[in-house]
Image: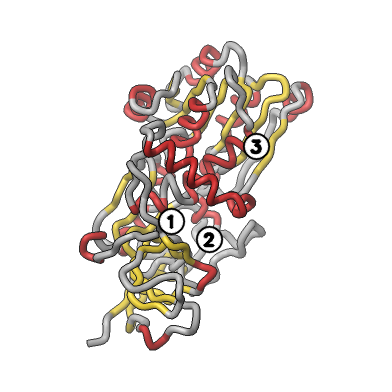
Amino acid sequence: MTRENLTYVLAERPKGNIIPGKTFKAQRGPAPTADDLKDGEILVEAVYLSLDPAMRTWLNDSRSYVPPVAIGEKMRGAALSRVLASRNPAVKPGDLVTAMCGWTEVAVVDAKSFEVVPLPPAGARPIDAIGVLGFTGLTAYFGLLKIGDPKPGDTVVVSGAAGATGSVVGQIAKLKGARVIGITGSEDKCAWLRDELGFDAALNYRSPDFARELRDATPDFINVYFDNVGGEILELALGRAAMRARFVLCGSISGYNTGGAKGIRNLPQVIAHRIRMEGFIVLDFAAEFAEARRELGQWLAEGKIKRKETIVKGGLPEAEKAINLLFEGKNQGKLIVEVKALEEAGGASRL
């Protein structure tokens, strides 16, 4: 019997929020099979689909670090996937891989678009391959350590601190001896940052006194600011920057659905305090991924960093609704759609 395959393609470019049933179009058809494989390719079924803020920027018809998703093209995305068939000597059926398979249930993936998931280190799980041991954790690791370069005693402030990347940034900063302040959008998230992740302070940007609270929390000013949000919070942080502060520009989620980012008004602060602001893409550091994963895995095994996932069940159709949770501040930690339960898929990671 031919297996049916569900795929989501871009139907129209959103001018604001992604609208379920309008931005993407569901397409059903026969799933690819082992007979469709060429040398080096593998056939996979998605298990856990990663949802990330950057995906919203891929839908805009504008110049970026990757070309925009074309109208009618399958939505891009990475997933922890199980190998169904292989013409690649690196993997065999049943293995787990992280694959850029897009928003589809079954896909053919070439050799450049997947990585084998090794046996998780102690304290880790296969799902961490798209979280703390995947691009999420690597983004935190390289952005903070290579660009932020925190020193013992520095004040490190992280916006979007309860998200997948921000929560790891703050914990790594603590390991490096910094005083860490997280900015997030609810009192529950503030408590999680302080009580479970060990942040020194956590601020709710929805507080009517947020500007004063940020000022009070940074009496020695900000040495490193890890920006996931942009907008007004970035402006306030610039006003609290120490001399020669490092501002790590990772994301600007506050502007992704508003039709365009606004310019920075606080540029005189950048000049007067010799602030360095630097953007980056995690792929800039691809040659160093293995060593970073080793260190992140060791911290996990030692209980020095923790992680949390918001897992949305219900299969691939939930993705077009769930992605908006990122922009509504309703996720905590890594946002993932369970396309197929790992136990049902029957996958097992391997060395």
Q: Is residue 79 above or below residue 288?
A: below
Q: Earlier in the sequence, mark 1 or mark 2?
A: 1
Q: Which residue is mark 2?
A: 59
Q: Is residue 198 visible?
A: yes
Which residue is tagged 3? Answer: 147
**Amino acid found under the numbered disc labelled 1:** Ile
Element under disc 2: loop
Query: Are the residues flagged by discs 1 and 2 in contact, CB closer than 8 Å?
Result: yes
Say left or right for 236 vs 351: right
Q: Between disc 2 and disc 3, whose residue precedes?
A: 2
Answer whether labels 3 and 1 touch (C-beta < 8 Å): no
Q: Is residue 100 above or below residue 325?
A: below
Assign a secondary structure to mark 1: loop
Q: Are marks 2 and 3 in contact (CB under 8 Å)?
A: no
Q: Position of residue 286 (x, y in %)?
A: 60, 54
The residue that mark 1 highlights is 18
